[in-house]
Amino acid sequence: MMKQLKRKIAYVKQQDIFFNHLTVRDQLTYTALLRLPSKWSKDRKHAEVDNLITLLRLQKCADSPIMLVSGGEKKRVNIGTELLTDPSVIMLDEPTSGLDSTSAVALLKMLKGLAKEQGKTVITSIHQPSSAVFRSFDSLLMLADGCVVYFGNPVDSLQYLKQQNYECPGGYNAADHWMDLLVTDSAIDEDTTSHGSELFEAKRKLIEAWDGEVVADEIENGVHVKASPSTDVEDGTTEIQEKKYNASWMTQFYVLTHRSLKNSRSAVFTSMNIIKAVGVGAVTGLIWFQMQNTERTVLDRSAYFFFTMSYWVFDAMFLALMTFPQERAIIFKERASGAYHLSAYFMAKTISEAPTRLSLPIFYMIISYWLANINNRFVVFLGTTFCTMLSVMAGESLGLLVGASVMDFDKAMTVMVVVSLALLLVGGFFVENMPSFIKWVKYLSPFKYSFDASQQMVFDRDVPCDGSGVLELICGGNSEGFATSEQVNEFLGVQGSIGFNIGILILMFILPRYGAYWFLNRKKGGERGT
């Protein structure tokens, strides 16, 4: 019975939380595809969205990103996501909070229209209503310290106060008069002045007076409560067979993948991000411009790859770090309404964001690699780009793990800075001779494995000696002869085969994501049956 009732009750939170890069129509459409009955056709679900947009008067902003719409329009979108399931009861937590008086009155008129025209029960909490908002209520429930002090018609409340010797002054907002009587803090309660004592006494008397009214009414009318068998709110049956989710797992995965791809595409492919990738790629390529395959450029080419990995892995780590702390409220809100499995959301997130996350590093590699002339073999370009992409995905996985385990953004940022810098420093480029008690940390670093694999691909041929002294132990300062690829890689401290290092990077991509999913699953509201 409780699950069935939950389907009939919609709760609209005070905060209007959405993916900002989706349009109003996108938000309502994805909600419809996830929460409306699976037996409905896609056309019918789209028709429901169109009808709702008209009902909520959102036609003008329907195709605008949510981040650009007004507060009143955003609030209507928030209400619309709950109205899609056609609830009988709509509960709203301070819907006018943050709205100007005109928008607040317009919103209340719309809600009253829903109550009158569609027969819905609308329950809303409001702390400081204007006189126009106050008059729009059909019924008024006033609370003080968790106790009822009045329930009935708003207009009649003034007469009630008059009966209790707290008459509202002429021309004064009735809502403000109620607030003056009921809202007191601990400092006022304990105030020994006459004004503080009067306020505290007024609240106490109003609570006691209403308790007396209720008791008298129960005695007069003989009110009794009798338990009855639970019945279905629709057809009166006591047996309820109900699916936990309206959409199948595959449908959830498809819809969430599409939504995540659209949102991340809009967030990543901004003009500034593209300029950043192209600009950094051009600057990097010009600094390492047209290096030759000689002894002199060995350390330079090695430094190019370590910089490239460091830049893009850090970028992925810290972007991923913000994912779950930012989306936590949305995940919990949608899952509380029974929209989807956590596993469907997580898989969709992993699959959909990979293309957008990797696109900018690929642009960078295309520009910088060939400007720098790291290795003129195209297969080496493909291999080193693949290694860089794997390290980016491994870095993203680590960011997701930290973000999921430490949901507080400031704390997660602190943890991520310490962890990422530690992994960078032990990655094999800055320090070779480390104390034995900390040397093992390098085997946890994605920088190490990507660096080792890339170096073996780049230095795949003999390097001519040029007398520069870079490979002093190999070339002996001579300008003749060659250093073999094996000698160069040994000089650079490369360990493991290409396949081994790539395999470890793949594990570093997969395992932290399992950890992130596990932490998400443990959070309050995380999973209703995976």
Image (tube, rainbow, N blue to C red):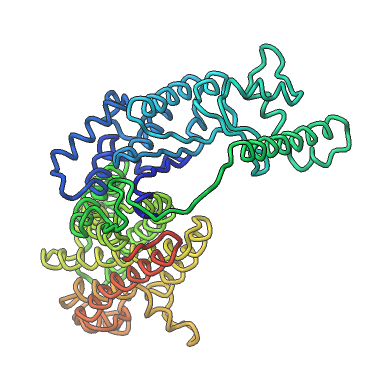
Left or right of residue 337, residue 226 in this image? right
Left or right of residue 149, residue 250 in this image? left
Name the residue rendered at 62%, 24% in the picture.
157
Seen in the picture, residue 528 relative to 489 is either above or below; the reply is above
Name the residue rendered at 64%, 40% in the picture.
219
- Where is residue 438 drawn, in percent x and y? 48, 82
- Judging depth in this view, the residue of 348 and 111 nearest the camera is 111
- Judging depth in this view, the residue of 429 and 331 nearest the camera is 331
- Where is residue 111 drawn, in percent x and y? 41, 28
- Judging depth in this view, the residue of 132 and 379 nearest the camera is 132
Seen in the picture, residue 363 relative to 447 is either above or below; the reply is above
Left or right of residue 407, residue 60 in this image? left
Seen in the picture, residue 187 relative to 112 is either above or below; the reply is below
- Judging depth in this view, the residue of 172 and 364 nearest the camera is 172
Left or right of residue 248, residue 71 in this image? right
* Residue 325, image quadrant: bottom left
Q: Count the marks.
A: 0
Examine the rendering and report whether any part of residue 271 can be seen. no
* Residue 499, image quadrant: bottom left
Seen in the picture, residue 443 relative to 527 is either above or below; the reply is below
